[in-house]
Image (cartoon, rainbow, N blue to C red):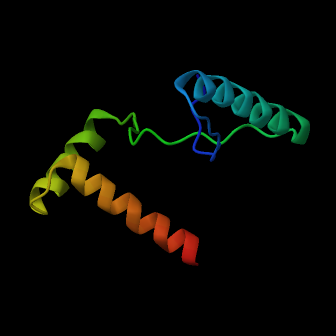
Amino acid sequence: MINTSDVITFYGRSVEDLKREMATSIEAHLGSCRAKGVEPSRPYSGKFNVRLSPAEHASIAGAAAAAGKSMNAWIADILAEAAERTLTG
């Protein structure tokens, strides 16, 4: 199976047709990617691990609590804001 966010289309009139056409379409897509020298795009999982020092962890936990948010929500908001600033200049 392929894990991609690229759009791969196929059709068929029966389950067997669909299985065969799906395999053919995936192989064609992967062959096209190889020919172009690119990796198929992959979807993001939504999980992001960060290693922090214990002092940084405590500081972030305190800031999140002061904002009335979970650490996850606080970090997600901070990162989204930073990404927006970076991408929009």
Residue in the picture at 68% in, 30% down: 21
Q: Quadrant of residue 28?
A: top right
Residue in the picture at 49% in, 42% down: 44
Out of 72 and 62, give the one closest to the viewer: 72
Answer above or below: position of 9 versus 22.
Answer: below
x%, y% of residue 41? 65, 42
Answer above or below: position of 47 versus 73.
Answer: above
Residue in the picture at 47% in, 70% down: 84
Q: Count all numbered tags in the image, as a single digit.
A: 0
Answer with left or right where residue 31 lies relative to residue 26.
Answer: right
Out of 1 and 16, give the one closest to the viewer: 16
Answer above or below: position of 67 versus 40.
Answer: below
x%, y% of residue 23? 67, 25
Q: Residue furthest front?
A: 13
Answer with left or right where residue 5 lies relative to residue 63.
Answer: right
Answer with left or right where residue 55 lies relative to residue 66.
Answer: right
x%, y% of residue 81? 39, 68
Out of 29 and 13, give the one closest to the viewer: 13
Answer with left or right where residue 23 lies relative to residue 74.
Answer: right
x%, y% of residue 78? 34, 61
Q: Residue furthest right?
A: 35
The C terminus - image quarter: bottom right
Q: Residue furthest bottom?
A: 89
Residue in the picture at 65% in, 40% down: 10
The N terminus - image quarter: top right
